[in-house]
């Protein structure tokens, strides 16, 4: 079980926000670019994350860093709802 408050406190110390995102099975967010750095952490489910053409499937609790200006996509590739934390720097 992910300690959401603990993650939020850690990210806050590093200058990031922390919010929860919920995606149904099959949801895809394709080719986004942000002006600020982003952190992402899978809480439950199964995601595929693509950052500048590199695909990964983070484990629950694994933190991913998405640098400002990177093209990225997030896909719920599982059969259940995916829950993930995300936060932008600034």
Image: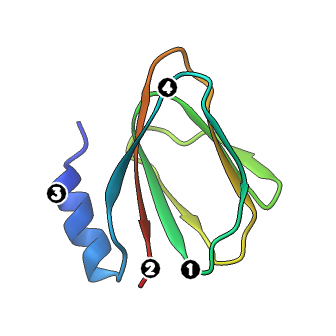
**Rendered location of residue 41, percent (x, y):** 43, 51
Q: CA distance from mark 3 to mark 1?
A: 22 Å
| Mark 3 closeness class: few <14, some 14–19, many ≥20 residues within 10 Å | few
Q: Earlier in the sequence, mark 4 or mark 2?
A: 4
- Closer to viewer: mark 3 or mark 1: 1
Label 1 to label 2: alpha-carbon separation? 6 Å
- Count every numbered label the image shows and give the total: 4
Task: Identify the residue position indicated by label 4 in the image.
Answer: 24
Would you call the spot at circle 4 few (<14 residues within 10 Å), some (14-19), or many (20 or more)?
A: some
| Above or below, 63 relative to 78 | below
Residue denoted by label 2: 89
Using residue 46 as the reference point, say whether residue 52 is left or right of it: right
Query: Sequence-wise, which precedes: disc 1 or disc 2?
Result: 1
Q: Earlier in the sequence, mark 3 or mark 1?
A: 3
On the image, the x and y values in percent for residue 20 come to: 34, 49
Camera-side mark, 3 or 4: 4
Which color scheme does this rendered protein use?
Answer: rainbow
Gap between marks 2 and 3 measured at Cα? 17 Å
User: Label 4, label 2: how many angstroms apart (C-alpha)?
Assistant: 26 Å
Q: Which mark is residue 36?
A: 1
Please state which of residues 52 and 17 is positioned toward the viewer in this rendering: 17
* Labelled disc at residue 5: 3
Q: Tell me which label, 1 or 4, sits earlier in the chain.
A: 4
Q: Image height check: is 86 above or below 74?
A: below
Q: In the picture, residue 47 is in which quadrant?
A: top right
How crowded pointer 2 is (Cα within 10 Å; few <14, some 14-19, many 20+) is rated as some
Residue at position x 54%, y 42% in the image: 58
């Amino acid at each position: 079980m992910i300690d959401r408050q603990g993650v939020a406190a850690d990210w806050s110390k590093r200058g990031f926000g922390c919010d929860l995102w919920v995606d149904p099975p099959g949801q895809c967010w394709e080719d986004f670019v942000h002006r600020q750095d982003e952190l992402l952490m899978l809480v439950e489910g199964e995601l595929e994350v693509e950052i500048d053409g590199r695909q990964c499937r983070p484990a629950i609790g694994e933190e991913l860093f998405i640098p400002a200006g990177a093209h990225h996509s997030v896909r719920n590739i599982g059969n259940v709802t995916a829950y993930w934390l995300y936060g932008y720097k600034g």
